[in-house]
Amino acid sequence: MTGRRYAAVWIAFLLLTNHQAVAALGLGPGITKITVNRGNQTDLMFTAMTDAENADNCTLSSDGEIKEWLTFYRTTISISPNSQTNFKAHLEVPKDTPNGVYTGTVAITSKPKKASSGFTGMSVLQTIGVKVIIEITGPEKSGYKITQVYAPPWIKSGKNVSVEFTVVNSGDTWIRPFAEIELVDSAMNSRYNMTRGLVKVQPSAEDVLTSEIPTDALSDGEYWLYVNTSWRGEQLWSGILKFNIVSENETQEIFSGSMLSLDYAKSDLKPGEQTSIKSEFRNSGSSTVNATMVFRVRSNQNLDEVRSSQKTVEPGEKAEYAVAYVPKTYGFYEAESFIEYGNTRTESRRFAFTVIAEKTTVDSGGAKTEDKTYWQVAAVVLLLIICVAVLYAKRGRRKG
């Protein structure tokens, strides 16, 4: 800000405060606007001022979209009567920030103090802020899409319907898609409208974002969700989802569910080492079910089965499961996992993993037995020793 602009702010501030009964703060410049490349940093300069009273230990703060980017060199400042004090804020823009214009405020707050010998503090609590506009520029790689939008076909009366968005971000900046959702009943009456930004998805990541739609004011029946998603004005996904609300005493029972995920250790397990197998189940039917995760594994013609604790899952809701398994010996293992619910089960997920050999293993009786690999190495070493001994013996005969 030029000296002329600062002088104008200072004169206007003095004219304003001369007509007030209490002391007042001032902060300039009125608007700060700069352009910064992604990943770069710079300092911003501000000027605080006061009139006839001391402003002792005033607190500095920031807010808005730029809050996390600003750091003050000093968190508090003091201003003498009828004077001004400069202070700096350090701006650092994360390298994964998308190009665009971001706004926020920088503020100063005085604290009321009782009069004491030597000085007089500000007589009232005051906060004054100025606008800061940051334009982010620079080359960026973009690539994003919504691969699936899901709403459960059945939910219990009074429960929210959860709309799930599967977002893939292959770019080098974060994205935050916006969702517009309209809930319509069977008579095509609009019952609920929502527009909101979803959670940020980081660069080179895939995430499932959820938006809750209230249905507590709706009766049993069929409903539709008109969904439109976008980012930076570009449409990502648009479509219609149908769902049903059923009461607790609904006689129609539809059992339907799916295993959403299965996580397990794929390699580098050791005999006697515990591993965890985790899964997630979604009840897409019309009835409440008691669901259990089943894990089966086969190795050397032996079949083991581990079951998780049972969980009650309402229509449209999800549940997470985990079981622990300890392989007894090294080798190749074939496994499958599924969820049992409502006298039926999900489709099995099949996979395999390897348990690596150790120097010793533990047999069924608990006693240590030598591993074959260990004996093979020992035999090779012994053979080398014998060869060296024979070679030296031949040399000795020749000398004799």
Image: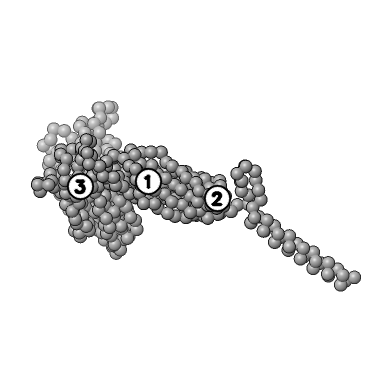
Q: Look at discs 2 and 3 and give the one toward the viewer.
A: 3
Report the Cα–Cα distance between label 1 and label 3. Answer: 23 Å
The residue pinned by badge 2 equals 270
Secondary structure under the numbered disc 3 in the rendered image: strand
Expressed as whole percent of the image width and height from the top left, the position of residue 229 reads: 21, 55
> Mark 2: which amino acid?
Lys
Can residue 165 be seen here? The reply is yes
Q: In percent of the image, x 20 and y 51: which residue is there? A: 241
- Whole-percent x and y of residue 268? 52, 53
Q: Which mark is residue 203?
A: none
Amino acid tagged 1: Ile
Q: Is residue 109 left or right of residue 19?
A: right
- Residue at figure coordinates x 69%, y 57% from the top left: 378
Please state which of the two labelled residues, at mark 1 or mark 3, is closer to the viewer: 1
Rendered view: 397 above or below 332: below
Q: Quadrant of the N terminus?
A: bottom left
On the image, numbered disc 3 is attached to which residue?
243
Earlier in the chain: of badge 2 and badge 1, it is 2
